[in-house]
Image: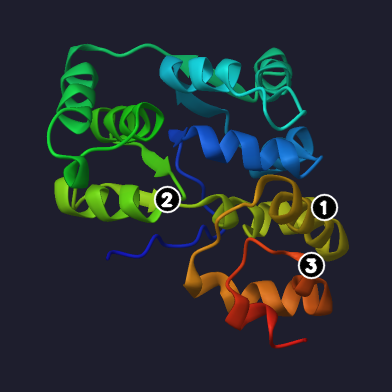
Amino acid sequence: MRQPQSFGETVPPLVVVDTSVVINLNATGRANDIVRAFGVTLCASGVVRDELFLDRLNGRDDAGLAQLLVKDGLLEFLPFDVESESLFESLVAGPAEKTLDDGEAATLALAAAWSGVAIIDERKAIKIAGDRFPDLQLRTTADILRSDRVFAALGRAEVAEAVFNGLKEARMAVPAFHHDWLVGLLGERIVECRSLPAALRQIFE
């Protein structure tokens, strides 16, 4: 599986986020500050907007929180064009092992059609993206949170609190290659993050 690469000081101009990324950022309690520090208006498909409206199980109203980001110019929902709609349809039709849910498919379709960077956390989506779009740049929510710009603006302690909240409240997925960073950032608090692999949490148990 191709591993997403971390952000450095430079952030690409077109960053397309999946539904889970918006949910993770909302769960940090600092979404506005994080995206503002990141320095780029995030983009998402209208499909992602619809998924956020349908998700009422977490008690946070992610659709409403996303609209606050839109109001502040930090998130923009975009429609498909002809190319991205065709790519979307190709990613949702076919055998289950080769297709994605609508939000993931829409994210990859927009990013691939418009030469953007896709922010996506699910392992299956990352694998399919690597197979279908080998030139597409991939990142994860964790890459936003550990970016130089966010650390400079919020400071280590506030980033640690945001990451902890994302793990606890949204069960944020974090790729294995970021686990050492998580351990260094959170220390013993990692034990409370039940969405992380047991082997990782057992370091402090």
Q: Amino acid at mark 2?
A: Glu
Q: Secondary structure at mark 3?
A: helix
Crowding around mark 3 (Cα neighbors within 10 Å: few <14, some 14 to 19, many 20+) is few
Task: From the viewer's perspective, tell me whether residue 64 is left or right of residue 7.
Answer: right
Whether the residues at callouts 1 and 2 have beta carbons within 8 Å, the answer is no
Q: Would you identify the image quadrant in which residue 111 lies?
A: top left
Q: Quadrant of the C terminus?
A: bottom right
The residue labelled by disc 2 is 122
Q: Position of residue 46 (x, y in %)?
A: 44, 15
Q: Quadrant of the N terminus?
A: bottom left
The residue labelled by disc 3 is 192
Q: Would you identify the image quadrant in which residue 54 lies?
A: top right
Q: Secondary structure at mark 1?
A: helix
* Mark toward the viewer: 3 or 1: 3
Q: Position of residue 195 (x, y in %)?
A: 63, 61
CA gap between label 2 and label 3 equals: 22 Å
Return the residue nearer the eye: 192 or 42: 192
The residue labelled by disc 1 is 154
* Mark toward the viewer: 2 or 3: 3
Decide: is 47 above or below 23.
above
Q: Position of residue 164 (x, y in %)?
A: 77, 58
